[in-house]
Image (spheres, helix red, strand yellow):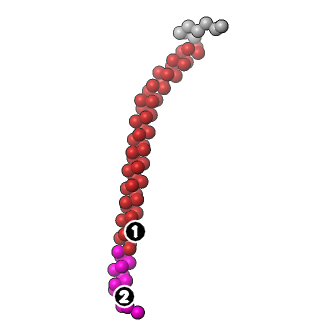
Amino acid sequence: MIHLDENHWLVRSILNFFVVYKYVVMIGIPLIYLLCVLHVFFTNFCKRQSNQIENNSGAIEMIDRQDQPPV
């Protein structure tokens, strides 16, 4: 049986991992949440913009067709 005290390299590396991991979680989770919110916002914004462009082009086509005399 290996005696592990708090100065053993394995114990120190595990404790250091958890100390660093705490900060990774504290920074990473809000960052992932922020990225998801921005992604949803921009996808909806881009869909809205493309829908407006399609609607406007449809309106322009209707105006162009009104100018032409019926065949």
Q: Which mark is residue 65?
A: none
Magenta stretch, main secondary structure class = helix
Residue at the bottom extreme, as displayed: 71
Provide residue 41's location: percent of width, then percent of height: 38, 50
Residue occupying image coordinates x 37% and y 83%: 65
Badge 2 crowding class, 10 Å Cα cut-off, few under 14, some 14 to 19, many 20 or more, is few
Q: Earlier in the sequence, mark 2 or mark 1?
A: 1
Q: Quadrant of the N terminus?
A: top right
Provide residue 48's location: percent of width, then percent of height: 37, 60
Provide residue 34's location: percent of width, then percent of height: 39, 41
The secondary structure type at the circle numbered 2 is loop
* 41 over 9 or under it: above or below: below
- Mark 1: amino acid: Glu
Residue occupying image coordinates x 41% and y 93%: 71
The secondary structure type at the circle numbered 1 is helix
Identify the residue under disc 1: 54
Badge 1 crowding class, 10 Å Cα cut-off, few under 14, some 14 to 19, many 20 or more, is few
| Magenta-colored span | 59-71
Q: Is residue 30 left or right of residue 16?
A: left
Provide residue 2's location: percent of width, then percent of height: 64, 8
- Mark 2: amino acid: Gln
Residue occupying image coordinates x 39% and y 64%: 51
Identify the residue under disc 2: 68
Membership of 44 in magenta stretch: no
